[in-house]
Amino acid sequence: MSTRRPPIPAHLRLQALTTLIAVLTSGCLGHHYDVSRGELERLAQQPPQTRGQNIYAVQQFTTDSEPEPATPWYPPEGAPPPGYTMGLHGHYWVPDFYIEYGRPYYEPPVYTRPSVHDASPVSGNVSGGGSAGSSSSSGSGSIGNVGEAIVVVIVIGVAVGIVLAATEGARYEGSVAVHPQHPVHLWHRNGRQSTVGLDQLTPDQLGDVERATLSGREGAGMWLRGAAPLNRAGFSYQFGAGEDRLALPGGENPRSLGFRFALGYYPVKQFGLLTDTRLQTGDFNGGSFYNVRLGLEAQWYPLAIWRLHLGPFVGGGQSWSASEGGALPTTSGARPYVSFGAIAEIEIATRLGLTFRWNQDWLPTATPNTRDMLSSWSVGLSVY
């Protein structure tokens, strides 16, 4: 009996293409940076002249809601007061210690004061940086159809992961510096927006404020002072590939390329819970097989050595598999599995890590000749 797989159905190809286009056109990084309510409260307690030198902010996408632009910012006329000096462009003041920061990452607009013949101020445009499972029968045709569907899922999952990794890898999260008088856009709970100078911010103004936004293209520009270390807190998408195995009667353990995808949440930086799936399909000894696992996984990273993070994981769930043809036995069914192992993660960016996994699977209800521990490994990316 032939085990040749039929082509991927047209509707599945169309769904995969539509999903991929939607992901690839989902937005790019912009020049607006979000500041949390807690960071605003901290800043409001600082001396006004030092508030702008160290602000924890997160770069936003251009598809996010953006605040209304602030009015043009003009530095005071005359010589700088004590503790201030002229900026690199000679048209704004900055505190003396800003000079060591060098040129701003986002250049400030060149504001021209209106003359008696001008109806309104003119603001030049200056570009800024930063863009920022299913059941099956034992027939080989059914195995081939399931295998093709698994390939479609893998393509979509990898495409989503690559786009997320690219955007989060480039997305800036960490310390920024702005002029002490930089405009701060406040977002209120009732949807109202307001703007206040950073040096004018008071705790009383934060009563109904949820967050704030800073624009690198306003005020005197913006300096990026250094990205924060790896921060897993929040939602996570993980994907990877490596060598996987399937336990079959008669001691057959076909090995092939396997893919892993996971989606979950880290309540703290060191610990997370994820929904985990592993997909494996291929040909072996003249036959075809597939293996799909779906379960839950807990990850813990207690050790960190510079950019290297180490920890264990444990999980379990249900697996669905089938095989037929050639020297492979004819099998089809579902059974639970238990999984555990170790993870080594290398920090790439604040929200992106390169992961290496060593995995052990145990099938507690399998037959004696398929109950052995199965080892596998994979390498991938974790997006937080």
Image (cartoon, helix red, strand yellow):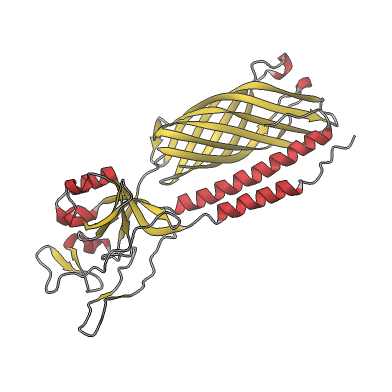
Q: Residue furthest bottom?
A: 117
Write down the quadrant of residue 254 in the picture.
top right
Q: Whole-percent x and y of residue 125?
A: 36, 73
**243 relative to 73, above or below:** above
| Pick the front one: 16 or 339 | 16
Q: Whole-percent x and y of residue 325?
A: 84, 31
Task: Classify residue 362 as left or right of residue 192.
Answer: right
Task: Classify residue 343 as left or right of residue 146.
Answer: left
| Pick the front one: 164 or 382 | 164
Q: Which residue lies furthest to the front in this view?
A: 190
The N terminus - image quarter: top right
Q: What residue is at 47 percent from the left and 57 percent from the top?
A: 28
Q: Whole-percent x and y of residue 5?
A: 81, 41
| Pick the front one: 75 or 337 | 75
Taking the image as drawn, is residue 316 in sight? yes
Taking the image as drawn, is residue 287 in sight? no
**54 relative to 314, above or below:** below
Write down the quadrant of residue 84 in the picture.
bottom left
